[in-house]
Image: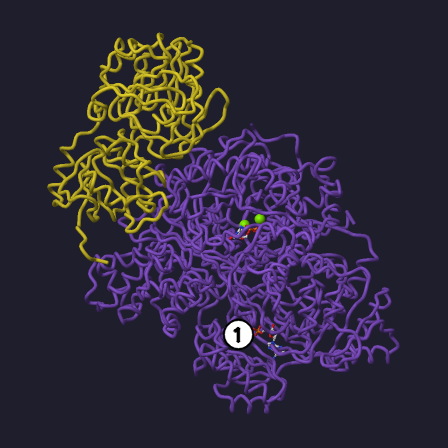
Chain colours: A purple, B yellow
Amino acid sequence: MPKRTDIETILLIGSGPIVIGQACEFDYSGTQACRVLMEEGYRVVLANSNPATIMTDPEFADRTYLEPLDPDVLAAIIDRERPDAVLPTLGGQTALNLAMALVERGVVGEGGVPLIGASAEAIATAEDREKFKEAMVGIGLQLPSSGFAYTLAEAMDTVASVGLPAIIRPSYILGGGGTGIAATHEEFRVLAAEGLATSPISEILIEQSIAGWKEYELEVMRDTADNCVVVCSIENLDPMGVHTGDSITVAPAQTLSDVEYQTMRDDAFRVIRRVGVETGGSNIQFAVNPTDGRQVVIEMNPRVSRSSALASKATGFPIAKIAARLAVGYTLDEIPNDITAKTPACFEPTIDYVVTKVPRWAFEKFPGVSDRLGTRMQSVGEVMAIGRTFPESLQKALRSLEQGRLGLGCDPAEAELAALDDDEIVRAAATATPQRIFHLAEALRRGLGQSRLAAATGVDPWFLDQISIIVEERAHLAGLGIDGVDRRTWRRAKRLGFSDGQLAYLLGCTEGDVRAARLAAGVAATFKTVDTCAAEFEAHTPYLYSTYEDDDEVPASDGKKIVILGSGPNRIGQGIEFDYCCVHASFALADAGYETIMVNCNPETVSTDYDTSDRLYFEPLTLEDVQNVLDAEQPDGIIVSLGGQTPLKLAAALPEGLVLGTSPASIDVAEDRQRWNELCDRLGLRQPAGDTATTVERAIEIAEDVGYPVLVRPSYVLGGRAMEIVYNAADLSRAMKELAHFGAGETAGSLGREGGLSAERPVLVDRFLEDAIEVDVDAVRDATGEVFIGGVMEHVEEAGVHSGDSACAIPPPTLGHATIELLEEQTGALAAALDVRGLLNVQFAVRRDPGGHDEVFVIEANPRASRTVPFVAKATGVPLAKLAARIMVGATLAELRTEGLLRPKATGHVSVKEAVLPFGRFPESDTLLGPEMRSTGEVMGIDTTFGLAFAKTQISAANPLPRSGSVFLSLADRDKPAGLRAARRFAEMGFDLVATSGTADYLIDHGLGVATVVAKLGEDTGSDAVELISGGKVDLVVNTPRGRGPRADGAHIRRAANLANVPCLTTVAAATAAAGGMDEWFNSPLRVRSLQEYHHQSQLTMEL
Amino acid sequence: MSGDLREAALVLADGTVFEGEAIGPPAATVGGEVVFNTAMTGYQEIITDPSYAGQIITFTYPHIGNYGVNGVDNEASRPFCRGVIVRDLARRHSSWRSSGDLATFMRASGIPGIAGVDTRRLTRHLRDSGAMPGAFGTADHTTLKQAAVDAESTDGCDLTAEVTCAEPYHRPAAADVESPFHVVAYDFGIKSTILRHLSKLARVEVVPASTSAADVLDRDPDGVFLSNGPGDPAAVTHAHQAIAGLIGRVPVFGICLGHQLLATALGTSTYKLPFGHHGGNHPVRRIETGGVEITSQNHNYAVADDVPTGVEITHVNLNDGVVEGIRSTEARAFSVQYHPEAGPGPHDAAYLFALFADLMTEGV
Ligand SMILES: Nc1ncnc2c1ncn2[C@@H]1O[C@H](COP(=O)(O)OP(=O)(O)O)[C@@H](O)[C@H]1O
Ligand SMILES: Nc1ncnc2c1ncn2[C@@H]1O[C@H](COP(=O)(O)OP(=O)(O)O)[C@@H](O)[C@H]1O
Ligand SMILES: [Mg+2]
Ligand SMILES: [Mg+2]
């Protein structure tokens, strides 16, 4: 059937901010969908609150609404745009749940705008666990025995019949939210209550636990003609009981015979048909009993998912793109397979390599949180690696993680395991944690037996044997000197995925020696193509991976080639923003006639779509792997400054002259404390006073010199890692000791693995600027010296809250003209001094003295893309990353202005960016914001005033401000004057005030009524804070502790708010912004506008 | 790791050399036509499929042997292929279904192999140059090259005699089939999975490839089945005659070689594809419904599309337009090029066995 002509406008719902369980994969799928639908001539209206996405670039839709993903807002957009159809299956669980909320209101579905992709009934059948079970039983499929509950009492009854251990699985969730396996009735009660609270329909499935069974996923597509295909099968190395998102997974399935696989395939088709997903992709999960092969259905996601992104990258079959085409009526056989160009998409990809995905976690950011993995997803990102065999792909994946590992052990970091005795190692391997794979390897290395490990861990013996092969090769190599390694041995080692770094470690030489010796022996990387068909047909898309085989498939070309190094796995501090920048560079350079070559290893991203660049190398971003690509491609230039710290780290080691943009020498000036200080002095820029120390004594000396409070932090870390604000000498010595002991003993964290304290890695001790306004400036400079200021962003939270965790606004809401000019001037001076070619981000702290006079301090400058580049671009309509890319290859701003790429900044509106924090996933963590960044994503709000734009961001960040009820205030002394103003506003809006005794006294003294006075910890008069919050008596918490560090007071209040899901603000600045925003929000009509309108003033005024 | 590796090589008739290690029973030189199969599962079924007689099978999926071998997945009592080429042979297998490992199975059944080969390079080479003779083993390259040149291609070869049964035998209908049909099945190299499917609707008498039409008709069947098998369909002339004597008199269903033989008997010609179809992911359109089925395929020859009047093309391959199925209503015969029985592969086309039953019902 050809495409539908009865629809003209399609509303696509995005997935909102990056959160745990929902990351860049939906930017990838949404971008593909937008592209396809535009190509097909539809008018595309997109709603998504995440500014860091490619899909929200104004070119990707006719109307882009960077508005909250909230039913009211969506209804307003629908009202304004009158779409003919809503496509909810490409925006993750968020879009699906939102669509269901709109169906409930009658806005969408029957009687409203029709859904395409999946009907409301299909969504309900898949997502409502009770309906799903009924449907599965109806078609004769097996499931673990189970029952349902809607209240805690029912849950207790149900578990009595299901038995323990049991798993609690809420309906309509994502990333295993609210799930958990209970072994005892006590555990069960807690988990069941959490599960009921997590499910939007308060429904939980209580199911017999089959932890330890093998877990599989099939990615299935279906079209309106009922053609069904399996795109990819995935086998989890970690057995059932560890969320797929937290499991090491492998494609294709490795240990299923054809008979078993085909049964699973038949069942998958029966599931998709029964659930009624008419078009598009679905993900169906199965568990298999390893002892008798019994297969049970675990769940089906009636939409494109994280696994579909993985499956697309793993096979070259673009699921989202095809799902979008199917949604508008095409059938699979009408869609061509891009890769072969001559065969249709109606087929099942077959691959001739092995793909391994390894998640990346961020437990070091959440002290006190256990790193045990379970049914709730906790990882923040993932890497994928392709190799011809499983050992090769596993080792490539492990070194792609950028966590200091060179592969599966054989690196300095493995020394840690020596301390564990044999039983401890087996026990460690039996517990799923991020380190499990290393524990398995170590246990096998010690010869503790595959059978023992299989029994203890549930990991399939085939995988264990494959790991043994690596471990045995290692033992063999360790017995040789570099001169004893012949060609066959080099080749065998490289074919097993050993990196040059690992080989150097084993052979006792340098990485350079290894490279030279093996190249001399004729063992060099070869590149093979991902082609969906195992070479049966010729491939037309150069999507390549390295391996060690006979021949190479890199196509010849004579274009001017630019390599763009990507940003690797998502992690806190380096996320989708950097992928956005790399993708923009690729687009801009392609437009300018260059051949673009992307190198990256993150399967979730747009950058690793084979369509984004002329060539894609799916490779780890290590020096060795990048060097291999350079050898194969002989490019004309390399871009290292757009992918965050990952490629920047490689800059110095890359061939001189090839690195485009700001020189590695300038990058070093900005990173090297000494040289940076000299530069600031020379330019007359003020910095917070401070110095570097390697001893406690020296640190105390500095602190006494500059005055407390001081900020201490290790050098060379990102995202404010291990930063602390200290107020006195005692705290300072403790902080110094902790830093010195990172990596040893109790406080050992990842920092230890990153290297301890030394002369090369001193601690920075700086005067902490209290109550300063933090400002970010993004600018671009070209070779002629012209500087373009992209945006000046005033932060809502004061300096001391990491820039990545604070809200910020364009234009600055409180900074005066003169200050802004000064900031721009200083940015220009720095850009010139560093001879920047491309992007520069400068962070400032502005202190306002009582006379209203602003003092400006420079905190740091980064001559590379910053996290805020996409936000600035969305706020102003100026594509900063594209400008930067062009400048790096020699264009000037003047030329780009003439070309039309650089156009005047859009003004007349206020844009606010807000951080999205993952505390809900880590109930034990303190929600206090501080200098260590912990947000996973961001949202943007745009409106005519700061208040309205801010209020929108709070809705988008799933932190919706209450309309009425009570506000609980507990403020540090220094915050009381400012807090009073916010409190007055809350009172005026009709909120009841609740406060801890000191704060209450202050408010009452200043004429405010306090409804409830709460006892401070340790006092026994007054109400109990935790009881009030968990009892649902508080609607908003404002808690600012005295200090901003790991030991800040009031942690119990914040934890209670986190557990009870009550919005909690930890700075007065945020409280003030919230009070203002709420006041305006609840008193003005809801107004939605598209980015295209904001960017084109005339259109905006026309439609206002 | 290094242990007792036996270095080996594969040399193609055009002189291209691939290095690897010997697996399975010792073999200095093993020659045959080198083909590739892109299925990711089902190596045991593939190795034991008699249609591979005379051929050396290259598996494009790198890990082979992961789930071992078992007593039920064999497609014939023994393998007829000449050898096996893999990138990696599993050292340890894992499956509750398995009764042994692939390496031992290969040794026991005398099928040598070579591992460690850059099978992707080999596949691309075969794709570009066409299936070609080759030889592998522990002999030196010159010897292997000569063996490769000497190895005959399947062109013009009737290989059915090598694989067919010596005497007719019975396969009873499955216990739960009420009033089963009686089917005579020609064994040109019949796969067990086909017999399993047929036995779900009929009691089957399997007869040798050389059986005459008269002999078959004497058995008074409700339908005749023409099996898959190896080699060049044009060379199996005795079957052309036999089938010509059957069509119109009794319903006929053919698969793979059986399809090519039926087509020939109906007046169509066959030709050799450059490198054949060998895999489990080929999309085939069923013209009648427009629906697409994903199919298991294993053939080097195909039926030309200039079918005579009275014969219609029922199925086509979406990748390359190759004729995948034909039917003659008048002759009450139909056949498909691919493998609806799977073993290994998807089950999408299993309905064809029901169509055979329907045809036999009409015939009553
Ligand atoms: N009955 C069960 N016993 C043990 N583990 C289970 C069971 N059901 C699900 N799980 C585990 O819980 C994880 C999350 O469950 P799932 O329903 O897939 O959540 P989500 O919808 O968020 O992906 C699964 O990946 C699996 O490892
Ligand atoms: N001297 C200072 N006074 C107050 N706050 C500071 C000072 N230096 C840094 N900060 C705060 O710490 C945060 C992180 O510091 P920064 O140097 O940007 O670290 P990173 O480079 O790791 O992101 C900043 O966003 C700012 O809020
Ligand atoms: Mg799941
Ligand atoms: Mg789900």
Seen from the viewer's position, the closer of residues A270 and A879 is A270
Give the vertical position of A579 relative to A89 (above or below).
below
Residue B147 in percent (x, y) is at 13, 37
Residue B20 in percent (x, y) is at 21, 48
Among the 4 quarters of the image, the one containing residue A86: top right
Seen from the viewer's position, the closer of residues A417 and A667 is A417
The chain carrying label 1 is A
Q: Report the quarter where the N terminus of chain B lies.
A: bottom left
Seen from the viewer's position, the closer of residues A545 and A971 is A971
Q: Residue at x 52, y 41 (%)?
A: A142
Q: What kind of residue is marked 1? A: Ala
Residue B301 in percent (x, y) is at 29, 25
Seen from the viewer's position, the closer of residues A350 and B195 is B195
Q: Is residue A878 visible?
A: no
Give the vertical position of B209 relative to A62 (above or below).
above
Among the 4 quarters of the image, the one containing residue A43: top right
Secondary structure beneath disc 1? Answer: helix
Q: How many numbered marks have been drawn onto this rendered protein structure?
A: 1
Among the 4 quarters of the image, the one containing residue A965: bottom right
Q: Residue at x 73, y 37 (%)?
A: A112
Q: Residue at x 31, y 57 (%)?
A: A496
Residue A417 in percent (x, y) is at 38, 71
Q: Which residue is mark 1?
A: A833
Please tell me how crowded label 1 is: few (under 14), some (14-19), or many (20+) other residues with Cα within 10 Å.
Answer: some
Q: Report the quarter where the C terminus of chain B lies.
A: top left
Q: Is residue A533 visible?
A: yes
Tell me if A559 is positioned left or right of A193 in this view: left
* Pointer 1 residue Cβ closer than 8 Å to ligand 2: no
